[in-house]
Image (cartoon, rainbow, N blue to C red):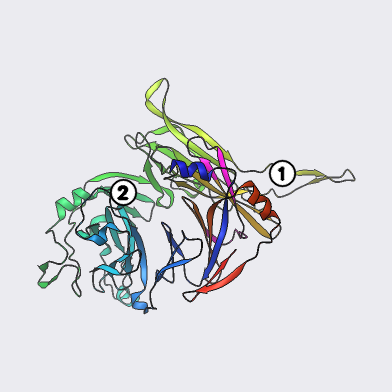
Amino acid sequence: MGLLRTILCQESTKFKNVWTTHSASPIAYERGRIYLDNYRCCISSIAQEPRILYQKPKCSKSEKIEDALLLECPLGEMLPNPSDYKPSLIVLTVQNWLLRLSADCGEILEKVYLAGSCCKFRYLSWDTPQEVMVVKSAQNKLPAAARQAGIQQSVLFHLAVFQVLPLSFIGMLEINKKVFGNNVTDVAISNGILIVMYSMGLVRLYNFQAISEQFMEQPFDLGCEFNWNGEVGVVGKYPFGLPCNIKITDTPPLLFEASSLENAFQIGGFPWHYIITPNKKKHRGVFYICSLKDNALAKNGIQDMKCCSLEPDWIYFHPDMSGRIIHVGPNLIKVLKLKEVEDNTDQIEIAEDFIIMANRENCVNSSVTVTSSGRVVKKRLNLLDDDPEQETFKIVDYEDELDLLSTVAVTEIGADGRAHLDLRCNEHGILLKSIPLLESWDVTYSHEVYFDRDIVLHIEQKPNRRFSCYVYQMVCDTAKEDECSRHERTERASFKKGGRVFEYT
C-alpha cells in the first residue's frame, strides 16, 4: 500500500475516465463492485472495460432488495464452509428474507426467514463491522382505522442481531413504548450500545450485552427445531422465522443520555468525548465537544464557523482512530485534536491540528464597488459562503488503506459546475494530488464520490430517478505519452454488453 501511494502521488500518474453507465434505478458501490438494477447486476470496476460479474433475471416486487451489506472473510480464522473464505453480499428482501449471496456470481449461499407480516424488516447495519450485524424493522404503525378505533400499538421496532461467518442468531428484541416511553422515533445498535432516540432531541444509551444477558428467555440456533409460545417450527425457516427471545420487561440501566438538535450525537476521541448541538434551532451549526466522563465542556469546545450558507457545516470524529475531529464548512476544513491543558492535566482543550482552505483567490466579494465613471455602488446582498460561483467543499472522506484524506471541491463556471478530487496527507493536510472530474457537476443534484485505492467513482442522481456512474482509473503515463496525447482527439464511443449500454473514452 505504501508503494501504491507513492506511485499514485507521482506527477506523471493520471486518472482517466475509462467508462460511464446510466441507470433508471439507484447505483451502489462496494469494494470494487458496482451494483445496478436493485443489486441484480454486478459489475467489476477494476477492469478497464466493464466486466459483468453476474446478471440475474428480473424478479417480482416481492423479491425486491431493501438493503445490503458486503461481508469480507476474517483473517486467521477457521470457517466451516469453503464459500466463507470469499466475499459475500448479505441482502434483505421486502418479504423479510435475509440472503447471503456470493459476491462473485450471485449464488445464494444461505437464507434465513426473519418474520411474518407482523413486522417489516428494512435496514441492515453493523454493530461491530464484519462481526456482528443488526437487522432493523420499519417503525410499526397501525392503520388509520385501527387508530380511530382506539387500538394502541405498543411495539415500535424489532431488532434482530446476528454473528456473521458463520452466520448465527444472537437474538431478537422489541422496542416497546411501555418500557422506553411514548416519544421514541428511532433506534440503533452500534459498538455494543443500544441507542434510543426521542422526538424532543433526547438520546439515551444502554448496554446491549447486559440487556441480552438479563432479558434473554432462551438462546436459539439457526436450523434447529423449537417450540415457542405454542408454535413448533425451525429457527430461520418459513413460515415461523425467528423467535423474539429477548423480552425487555423493565427499563434497563441507563449508561448515558444527552439532548441534541435532531438527535445528532457522536462519541469518540481520547479520552472519550461526545459532540452535540444544543437542542434549539438558533444553535444550528454550533457544536459542543464535552467529556463523556463528567459532561464537562472542553476548553475551546464550542465550535462555530458562523457560516452563511444554504447547506450547513458538519462535524465528525476522524475515522482513522486518531481521536481527531474533522469540521467541514463551505470554504474551510478544520482538523482538530484533543490535548491536555498545559497548566491543568485534568482538563482537555480543542486545538487546531491543520486547516484546509478552499481556493478563492480570484473571488471578489466586496460590498462596495467603483464604476469607471467614479460612482460608488453599494451591494445590498452579499454572496453566501457556499455560492456556486465560489469553490466550495462538498465531500470529505478518508482512504484508510493509503492513509489519505480526500476532498471534493466544486466551482460553477458559467452554466457548468466543475469538480476536482484532492488527495492530501492525512497527518498534515498537504496537497499531494488533484484529480479533475471531467463531467459537469450540478450542485442541485445528489452526488457520491468514492476513492478506493486506484479507482475514483462518481455516482450522480438526476431528477426523475436518473442515475449515472463515472469510473476513473489510475494510469501511469510517460512524458512522451503525455506529449502525444496532447495532439490526439478524445472521442467517446458506446457499446452494449449484457443488455446494458456503456460509454468509454
Residue 373 falls left or right of residue 297: right
* Residue 313 horizontal/vertical position (percent): 53, 47
Is residue 395 found left or right of 137 in the rendered image? Answer: right
Q: Is residue 437 above or below residue 356?
A: below
Name the outermost residue toward the top: 343
Residue beneath disc 1: 362
The Cα–Cα distance between marks 2 and 1, rounded to whole angstroms, is 48 Å
Q: Which mark is drawn over residue 204? A: 2
Instruction: Give the extent of the magenta segment.
Output: 423-447
Camera-nearest residue between 386 and 140: 386
Q: Is residue 438 magenta?
A: yes
Residue 419 x, y percent position in the rendering: 61, 53
What element does badge 1 sit on? loop
State which quarter of the image contains the C terminus: bottom right
Give the residue at x 46% y 50%.
453
Q: Quadrant of the N terminus?
A: top left
Q: Nearer the viewer, residue 450 or 256?
A: 450
Q: Is residue 62 above or below residue 332?
A: below
